[in-house]
Amino acid sequence: MRCSVIALPVLAAATSVVARAPTPGEDGKYTISSSGIKAQFIPYGATLTNLFVKDKGGEDVDVVLGYDDVAYYPKDPGHPVYNSIPGRYVNRIGKGTYTIDNTTYTTQLNDGTNTLHSGTNNWSYRVWNVTAATDDSITFAITDASNSSQGMLGLVEGEVTYSVKGSTWSIKMEATSPDVKTPLMLTQHTYFNLDAYKNPDTVKIWNHTLHMPYSKRYLAADDGALPTGEIGTAAPNSINDFASKANLFLGHAQNDPRFAGNCGGGGACEGYNGYFLIDDAPKDAVVVSLASAYSGITADLRTDQPGVVIYSCNWMDGSADLKSTQGTADNRKVVRSSCVAIEAQDYVDGINHPEWGRVDKQISGPGQTYSWESSWTFGSF
Ligand SMILES: *[C@@H]1O[C@H](CO)[C@@H](O)[C@H](O)[C@H]1NC(C)=O
Ligand SMILES: *[C@@H]1O[C@H](CO)[C@@H](O)[C@H](O)[C@H]1NC(C)=O
Ligand SMILES: *[C@@H]1O[C@H](CO)[C@@H](O)[C@H](O)[C@H]1NC(C)=O
Ligand SMILES: *[C@@H]1O[C@H](CO)[C@@H](O)[C@H](O)[C@H]1NC(C)=O
Ligand SMILES: *[C@@H]1O[C@H](CO)[C@@H](O)[C@H](O)[C@H]1NC(C)=O
C-alpha cells in the first residue's frame, strides 16, 4: 500500500512529462485519440490514414479515404495525395516558372504544362520523421534539401503537429527557409466521404451538403485547373454557389450543362476542382461545413488560410480499393465523384499573380517562419 502510494506520482510524471517513445501499432499506424475521435497516421507523407468520428447513432465512422495496407501508399500508381502534406509549394505553378528578386526559376512540368505539388520528389512522397507523440498528438518533421524538387532552391525545415481534443482534430504546420527565399505554401489534402461509402442509395458525393458562407468569390481557372487571373463571384444558386444558403447539395448544379466541364479536362471533369476565396471571415469562424444526412455527420473547418480548394474526386476511376472500415459488400472501390478533398491553402499560383497581393505570403526566406493552422470539428444531426 505505502509503496504504491509513493510510486504513483513517479509513474504519472513519467507518462505526462517524458513523452512515451513514439511507436506505431502492428499495422504500422500511429494512433491518437480523444473522447470523440480516433485518428491514425503514417510517416509516409505525414499521412492521416483513418479518422473515426461519431455518427448520429454514436457509432464510429471512418470518414477519410486511405488504405488498410500502409505498404500500398508508396506503390499506389494514382497517388491522389490521400490526406498527406504536399510541399514545399502546394497545387499548381503556372507554366513551371516563377520569379524571385528578378531571377526566374524553372520547375518540373508534371501536370500538363504546369507544375503540381512541386513536381516529383514532393513532400507527399517522403517518409517523414516522427519527432514527438503522446496519446492525443503526433508531430512529423521533414528536411527538404535545396533543389530536391527541381527549381526550388534552399534548404527547408518543415513540421506538422496533429492533435485531437473532444470532437476536434487540429493541424498546425511550420516551415522555415533559413538560407534563401523560396516558394513555401502548404496544405493538408484531406479527402472525405462522411458516409464511409455505406449509404445504400448513393456512393457519390453529390448528396453531401457544403456551406461556405464567406466564399462567394472563386478563382476562375482554365482547362488545366490553372487560375486565369480572373476572380469570379457566384450568383445565388449558380454552379459555384455554396455561400448563399446552408443546405446546398454538392450536386445542386448537376443539371446545369456546365457541371460536366466545370473543372476542366476538356469537359471531362465534372463538379469541382477549384479555389474559393474566404472573404472577411471573423477570427475562428467556421468557414466550411460539410454534412451528410445519411450518417448525420457534420464537419466544420476553421482555418487561418485565405481560401480553400474543393475537389470532388472526378479523377478517381474506380480502381482504388476502399479500406475494410468503409463500403458495403456491393461497393469496395473508390468510384468517380465519390469523395471530396477540402484543402485550406493560399491562392493557387498566387506566386505568379502579383495583382492578388499574395506573393509575399507565398515566398519565405531567412528570418521568417511560415505557419498554417486549421481544425475540423465533428458533430451530428
Ligand atoms: C529588379 O529589377 C528592377 C528593374 O530592373 C530593379 O528596379 C529592382 O531593383 C530589381 N530588384 C532586385 C531585388 O534586384
Ligand atoms: C511526387 O513525387 C513522386 C516521386 O518522385 C512522383 O512519382 C509523383 O508523380 C509526384 N507527384 C506529383 C503530383 O507530381
Ligand atoms: C529524418 O532524420 C534523419 C536524421 O536526422 C535525417 O537524416 C533525415 O533526412 C530525416 N528525414 C526527413 C524526411 O527529413
Ligand atoms: C536543380 O536540379 C536540376 C535537375 O533536377 C538541375 O538541372 C539544376 O541545375 C539544379 N539547379 C541548381 C541551382 O542546382
Ligand atoms: C440528392 O441530391 C440531389 C441533388 O444533387 C437532390 O435532387 C436529391 O433530392 C438528393 N436526394 C436526397 C435523398 O437527399
Image (cartoon, helix red, strand yellow):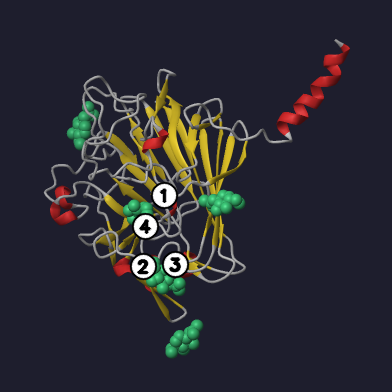
Identify the amino acid type marked 1.
Tyr
Q: Are marks 4 and 2 in contact (CB under 8 Å)?
A: no
Q: Are marks 3 and 4 in contact (CB under 8 Å)?
A: no
Q: Are marks 4 and 1 in contact (CB under 8 Å)?
A: yes
Mark 2 neighbour class, 10 Å CA radius: few under 14, some 14 to 19, many 20 or more: many
Residue 370 or residue 141, whichever sits in front: 141
Q: Is residue 2 above or below residue 166?
A: above
Residue lying farthest to the top in this orientation: 1
Q: Earlier in the sequence, mark 4 or mark 2?
A: 2
Q: Nearer the viewer, mark 3 or mark 4?
A: 4
In the picture of the structure, the residue carrying the numbered disc 1 is: 125
What kind of element bears circle 4?
Answer: loop
Horizontally, residue 220 falls left or right of residue 178, namely left
For the C terminus, the quadrant is top left
In the picture of the structure, the residue carrying the numbered disc 4 is: 120
In the picture of the structure, the residue carrying the numbered disc 3 is: 152
Horizontally, residue 205 falls left or right of residue 6, namely left
**Image location (x, y in percent) of residue 367:** 62, 68
In the picture of the structure, the residue carrying the numbered disc 2 is: 107
Q: Earlier in the sequence, mark 3 or mark 2?
A: 2
Identify the amino acid type marked 4.
Thr
Q: Is residue 373 visible?
A: yes
- Marks 2 and 1, how far apart in space? 17 Å
Q: Are marks 3 and 2 in contact (CB under 8 Å)?
A: yes
**Image location (x, y in percent) of residue 30:** 53, 33
